[in-house]
Amino acid sequence: MTTTTNRIKTSFQVWKDNFLKFVIAEIPMAIVIGIVFSLFSLVVAMGIVIINPSITFVDAFMDYLTSWWPILTQGDITLLLPSLIISIIVPLYAIGVWFVFPIYGLVRSILFESTDFPIKPFDWLKRGKERYLITGIVLSLLSLAPGSITVVILTEIVGRPVVYPLDWIIGFIGLAIFFVMMGLLMMYVPSVVSGKGAIEGLVNSFNLVKSNIKEVFLMWLFYLFMLIVWFIPIVLHVFFFGFVTPGTDPFQSFLVAIAGLGAFFDGFVVLPMMIVGMTHLYDEINVK
């Protein structure tokens, strides 16, 4: 079997040689995701205002967008459960998987000269969209919900407000669970793309990862390290300025700009590389 280092090098080379193809495939889906997620955010904000008229619409909208932060701080159950698990995880990951599937199809066509999967960004909608939607929901619930629920339970046991260092300890426990769950799910989307159903693909992913745990988790660890590039400036911003809207401070603006570039880097560089690497690994595992 190819070493992890060589597989990563291959993923970079494939990305570099097909950069424009990836960009063309990703941009339309990214626009759709942005529109749908923004509309969903507005609906949730309106619901918050209806339930509690004392909250302004803008505050409700911002609370919704920033409600992931309690995972790393105080685990506020009133925000965490309704806003994170219901309002963020399911729609974001369901649509996110819709975004990922065309890229997986493009990668398969590049690596294996396969023509049995749609290449154009929206063509995949014509076949198996229900299967892909179910995959997205399953992936979302199994990857993020266990860690989130664990954080909430630990927070309730410790008692709120959670203070340093317990807030960080609880937060990192949640992140560790997320890391393990995502590692177990790394072969999930490739399994569904190869033709398996949403549940059959899930079982297949667990079995493949269990028998190839070292290779899968080494790949996941590398790409995770690359993916958090955008997150580091946000952490620094919170550390220096708190979780507030950027003002006129040059350093504040710099951190926000770096975070924006990091998000672009993740979407157009790391994500395609990860999909190439995991597709290549999935194929190797199945033929060895």
Image (cartoon, grey):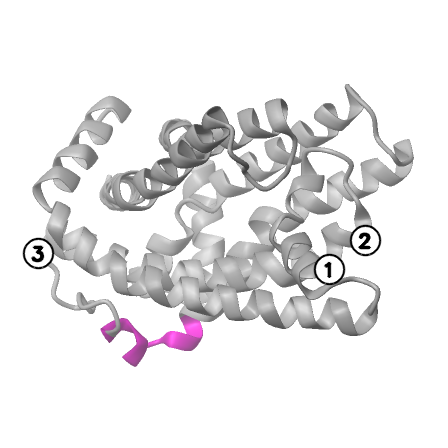
Q: Are marks 1 and 3 in contact (CB under 8 Å)?
A: no
Residue 137 horizontal/vertical position (percent) = 54, 63
Part of the protein shown in magenta: 123-131
**Circle 3: is it few (<14), some (14-19), or many (20+) Cα within 10 Å?**
few
Q: Report if the CB atoms under discs 2 and 1 are less than 8 Å apart.
A: yes
Relative depth, front residue between 99 and 61: 61
According to the image, label 3 marks what residue? 113
The vertical placement of 89 against 149, above or below, is: below
Q: Residue placed at 26% from the left, 57% from the top?
A: 26
Query: In the rendered image of this protein, does residue 234 appear above or below residue 89?
Result: above
Q: CA distance from mark 3 to mark 2?
A: 49 Å
Mark sitting earlier along the chain (3/2):
2
Q: Is residue 139 above or below residue 227?
A: below
Q: Name the residue located 39 percent from the left edge and 47 percent from the top edge.
A: 187
The kind of secondary structure element at disc 1 is helix
Q: Which residue is mark 1?
A: 82
As drawn, the label of residue 78 is 2
